[in-house]
Image (cartoon, helix red, strand yellow):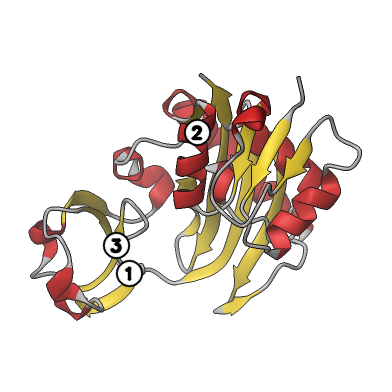
Amino acid sequence: MKNIVALSPIYTEDSNNLKKASINSPYELNRFNAKWNVPKEFREDVIAVYGEDIYAEIVADQCNLILSKPADNWLSRISEEFTKRKISYGQLKDFVHEENIFIKCSDFKSFKAGVFDRVTNIKGFDSLDLESMVFTSEVVEWELEVRCFVLNNEIKTYSSYWRNNAFDTNLLSEIEQRDLFEFFNNFIQQYSETLPKAIVIDFGIIQGKGWALIEANPAWCSGLYACDAEKALEVVVESCVKN
């Protein structure tokens, strides 16, 4: 049996880097073809998938994979000790009168997350399902944002991706690295049982408040930024379970 990781047919820098990282690994990364269809003769050999969330879900169904991810309301259940901001979870209709708020749909598909003066200013609001589930958060200023690929409660690789309102994947300072790992260790001691063993967690520094949890995302559809692709690949593989 081969250990195949199905890659989306859409070529991205991340998928190309994972493909290169697989050369000396036990895994074979295969795009198969331009259609979102794994040939039947390969489906038993597919142990993981990486790509857009819709693609991953389709392939998982074909190849009998369980895609691990946080519970839909997970972020809203985390203490403000770690989020450093008030986060709510509910139906879109519950927040239509809110102003100056960050809002994000829980299925990642309905609309683009962002800060809105009024919720009704979301692009295409009139066509949205008012019963769809969303997260809301008070607006904060992020000075730094860092992506972490986590396996068995350990950060395997990490990369900054945003600093002072600009895309930035430069290395963290020694102090930032130390403080990140200290914050992560405190967080994971309390919340490890609420997360899959393989997950991507983003942390950052909020202006005036310090280190905070941003969110958690499935490894099988998360961008790498400047993370070590070989280590990230291991987390991706472990985030998919053969049923």
Q: Residue 120 in the image: x percent, y percent?
A: 15, 76
Residue with the mark numbered 3: 110
Residue with the mark numbered 1: 139
Q: Secondary structure at mark 2?
A: helix
Q: Secondary structure at mark 1?
A: loop
Residue 120 visible in rendering: yes
Which of the 4 image quadrants contains residue 17?
bottom right
**In front of the other: label 2 or label 1?**
2
Q: Residues within 10 Å of mark 3 (few under 14, many from 20)?
A: some
Q: Secondary structure at mark 3?
A: loop
**In front of the other: label 1 or label 3?**
3
* Mark 1 residue type: Val
* Mark 2 residue type: Gln
Residue at x 57% of width, y 30% of height: 240
**In front of the other: label 3 or label 2?**
2
Asked if marks 2 and 1 touch (Cβ < 8 Å), the reply is: no
Give how far apart the Cα atoms at labels 2 and 1 are: 40 Å
Q: Residue 184 in the image: x percent, y percent?
A: 58, 40
Q: Residue 144 in the image: x percent, y percent?
A: 58, 66
Residue at x 76% of width, y 19% of height: 1
* Mark 3 residue type: Ser
Residue with the mark numbered 2: 62
Up-down relation of residue 5 to residue 140 (above or below): above
